[in-house]
Image (cartoon, coloured by chain):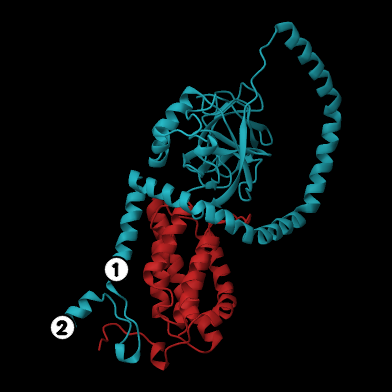
Amino acid sequence: MARMREDSFNLIRRGGGRRGRAPFRAVLGLLVFVSVALLALSRLDHSYVRGARTTIAEAMAPVLSEVQAVAEPVRWLIEQARRHGDLSRRVEVLTRENQELESWKWRARELERQLGDLVRTARVVHEEKRPFITARVVATSTGAFVRSAMINAGRAQQVRVGYPVVNGDGLVGRIVDAGQGASRVLLVTDINSRIPVHIDTIETRALMVGDNGAHPRLIFQNDGASIMPGQPVFTSGVGGLFPRGLKIGEVVSTPAGLAVATKANLDSLEYLSVLFFASPALELTDQAGGSATARRAQATPIGGGGPLR
Amino acid sequence: MSLVRSVMPPLVFLAFAMLAAVPWGAASASGIIGPLLPAVVLHAMNSRSPGAVPEWLTFLGGLSLDALTQGPLGYFALVYLMAYVMAAMTPVSSNRLVSWLRYAPALVVVLATAWLVSSLYMLRAQDVMGYIEAGAVAFCAFPVLSWLLQPLTPAPVGPGAATYTRGAGL
């Protein structure tokens, strides 16, 4: 009887104790159950799971920053190998682009002169320069679920939910979780990313929709739009979440239809810049989408608190 | 078993779990190659010395990785627990080639679990090629990691540790 009770408690036994084999303990079954329960709660996007994820990620961010130092030589080697393999193709592309740019140079100078005249004539108000901070990517997403990156800057550095994130090549994504010292960037390729864009000219508009693949798709193009592969894609500013005119990439044709090849290489992000782009829509997003940490931070703002203007 | 040999396996496993979240700059179809390496480490150490990395630490390693990579909590925890079970069910062999070959079915089960859970979570079948790619890398990495980690892993308990049977209590 005692043996039966023991066996029912030990879900699976790994052999007999006499021969020195450790049993599978009941805790294993419990842990599997907890894992499945957490998965279910994550699927429901429960606020506790969101809060726990942000708290753990924020607590681990300093450790990850240190781990980066160990990873740096390997990362450098991978980058060098990729560059070397890509070198001949890049030279060819750059030579062709250089020829095209030479022919555009004289025209750009002429347009610049004309624009200067028009600005002076129309007395156009100059746009304010947009402040930004640059932070390091300390972790990236894995698996099929999400496309995101974690940076080592948060509310302590005035980062707020909704701020656009760019690198030297163009738009990368936007802030969706902001802790005190770390934030999460939702990449433009994520399945939850929806960005209004214009293609080539301001008249051609569409919605760029991520699908966790390499190229976000273009949907809801306006009627009569003529979109061709190779045309540049920019943010349109519609909806107020992104400023107008941020470079994203260019149109490519895929089996699923028209998509966007992002100029920024989202597989090898290292440093990202967060643009302090404040708008009424962003303030609402920051207040509604903030995690428990975010709410705590709003209650006790650092450095004056509130969105930057 | 020395203190170092009992402490090192959990630390190595957690270090690999941490490194899986670091951006390496290498693209992969499924993004699971990095996170699969802690499972390889777990198998290499636990199949040689059962319980070298305990199940609760396996769970914590997976959970930390889930949080750091902003994926659903519990996913890698479940995948690593499956790797733990498969490591415990794989008979130990002193022959490296046999150990390597015996790792193949365990790897297939772990990958199938990862693919199935991910497909169920997303409510659509995931691309199998990414998992096959990750499986190939993990299979090639196993003998190397197994050899590298051998000095850190406690020696097998004895000939009896080679097989595991269900329900064989005292």
- State the CA–CA distance, disc 2 to disc 1: 21 Å
Image point 40% across, 68% down: which residue?
B57
Which quadrant holds the C terminus of chain A? top right
Above or below — where is B20 with respect to A224?
below
What is the crowding at mark 1: few (fewer than 14 residues within 10 Å), some, or many (at least 20)?
some
Q: Colour of chain B?
A: red
Q: Which mark is residue A29?
A: 1
Mark 1 residue type: Gly
Q: Is residue A165 left or right of residue A306?
A: right
**Residue bearing the label numbered 2:** A2
The answer to whether residue B47 is seen in the rendering is yes
Which of B135/A264 is in front?
A264
- Looking at the rendered structure, the kind of residue marked 2 is Ala
Whether callout 2 and callout 1 share a subunit is answered yes
Q: Residue A6's image quarter?
A: bottom left
User: Which chain does the numbered disc 2 sit on?
Assistant: A
Name the foreground residue: B40 vs B158.
Answer: B158
Between circles 2 and 1, the one closer to the viewer is 2
Q: What colour do you see for chain A?
A: cyan
Residue most toward the left? A1
